[in-house]
Image (spheres, rainbow, N blue to C red):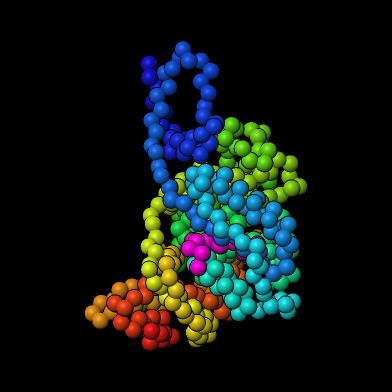
């Protein structure tokens, strides 16, 4: 008799690819009746910059960066060398007044975005010392991101999974909070956005599975498990209770509570990790501010070489109020539509308004582009930069 096993095949083969030294041992070669049907999936790499921000110590940055890198590598469906890391110890400074203004926070996030762009990376994690978000932003959280910035997150030292959690909020993954119904619904209800994780299929309409938010406390995520032999991370074993990393911070007060990745999240990530970006020979970076009162302000623009160009797919909303176009003599050569949310997502489930966001795009720039113009909602004219 042959048994055909199809369950988990995608995940299974991928773990085998990642942890090739941990291939399953056959303890009884005389009964070889298992017929595995597998699908090999190639995933694209994730490119990530880690940068220290403000007054974090070199030791804290180094340790935290390794922890973050290690957790992302172990949980994301990328190959062993599929997380391309660019880490530099050069600190990004912020103004030294006590609480940053919305504009100063916008400048920091924009600065990080540009650092990622110049490094040719999709994502960047600014790492700050523990309690920095409380001290400098007056918010109780260990990490933050904003859908107004394509690839930027901030995460504090002393955490394990925060950067992976914040990264997963970004396009193309757009995963949602699993530690509270309200946190999940805030994102699920956003225009142009629907949570790919956590929806209860047994309940009509959209609702987070109650099992995800009601496990042991406020920091829950959806329960998960994996093959014990494949944990290979920080003493996780088969008695450890695991929760998906889209829950809140790990809770050291609950014995055995650990973050890992759920099958559902893994499937979402695997499904999104495909496609390529185009690298232009010569590009123009354009940076500007949007203010919540409807005005905009040009920041700067410069031409540089060999960067990855912005694409529509990086933006959450494709039918928004703002459009960026480049034109040559006869055609629109680039057309990106987006919207601005004016909000920061702090871990802990708090979505806070902000009065200003800084935006940037990278557009192709060549002699064929005659006087590249960017039309941003008809409000800000950036034409004539050439
Ligand atoms: Zn979150």
> Which quadrant: the C terminus?
bottom left
Between residues 384 and 258, which one lies in front from this camera angle?
Answer: 384
> Which quadrant: the N terminus?
top left
Start and end of the magenta stretch? 118-127
Q: Position of residue 343 (x, y in %)?
A: 56, 71
Residue 126 is covered by the magenta coloring: yes
Which residue does the image show at 39% across and 33% down from the upper left? 38
Decide: is 96 above or below 67.
below
The answer to whether residue 382 is left or right of residue 358 is left
Decide: is 42 above or below 98.
above
Residue 342 is covered by the magenta coloring: no
Residue 158 visible? The answer is: yes
Q: Residue furthest top?
A: 30
Decide: is 164 above or below 300.
above
Which residue does the image show at 50% across and 56% down from the upper left? 47
Decide: is 211 above or below 23.
below
Q: Position of residue 323 (x, y in %)?
A: 38, 77
């Amino acid at each position: 008799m042959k048994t055909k096993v199809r369950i988990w095949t995608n995940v299974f083969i991928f773990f085998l690819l990642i942890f090739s030294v941990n291939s399953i041992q056959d303890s009884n070669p005389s009964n070889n009746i298992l017929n595995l049907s597998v699908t090999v999936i190639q995933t694209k790499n994730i490119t990530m910059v880690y940068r220290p921000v403000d007054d974090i110590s070199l030791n804290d940055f180094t340790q935290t960066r390794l922890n973050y890198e290690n957790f992302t590598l172990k949980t994301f469906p990328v190959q062993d060398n599929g997380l391309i890391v660019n880490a530099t110890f050069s600190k990004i400074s912020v103004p030294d007044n006590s609480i940053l203004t919305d504009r100063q926070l916008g400048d920091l996030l924009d600065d990080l975005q540009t650092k990622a762009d110049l490094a040719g990376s999709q994502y960047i994690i600014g790492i700050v010392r523990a309690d920095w978000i409380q001290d400098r932003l007056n918010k109780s959280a260990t990490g933050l991101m904003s859908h107004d910035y394509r690839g930027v997150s901030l995460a504090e030292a002393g955490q394990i999974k925060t950067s992976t959690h914040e990264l997963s909020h970004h396009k193309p993954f757009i995963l949602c909070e699993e530690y509270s119904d309200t946190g999940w619904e805030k994102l699920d209800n956003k225009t142009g956005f629907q949570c790919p994780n956590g929806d209860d299929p047994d309940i009509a309409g959209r609702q987070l599975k109650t099992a995800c938010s009601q496990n042991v406390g406020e920091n829950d995520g959806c329960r998960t498990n994996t093959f014990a032999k494949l944990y290979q991370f920080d003493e996780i074993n088969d008695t450890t209770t695991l929760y998906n990393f889209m829950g809140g911070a790990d809770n050291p007060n609950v014995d055995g509570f650990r973050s890992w990745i759920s099958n559902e999240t893994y499937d979402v990530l695997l499904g999104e990790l495909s496609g390529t970006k185009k690298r232009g020979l010569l590009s123009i970076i354009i940076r500007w501010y949007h203010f919540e009162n409807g005005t905009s302000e040009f920041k700067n623009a410069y031409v540089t070489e060999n960067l990855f160009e912005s694409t529509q797919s990086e933006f959450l909303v494709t039918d928004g109020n703002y459009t960026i176009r480049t034109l040559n003599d006869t055609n629109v050569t680039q057309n990106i539509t987006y919207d601005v949310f004016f909000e920061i997502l702090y871990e802990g489930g708090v979505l806070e308004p902000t009065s200003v966001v800084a935006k940037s795009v990278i557009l192709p720039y060549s002699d064929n582009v005659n006087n590249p113009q960017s039309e941003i909602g008809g409000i800000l004219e950036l034409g004539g930069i050439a």
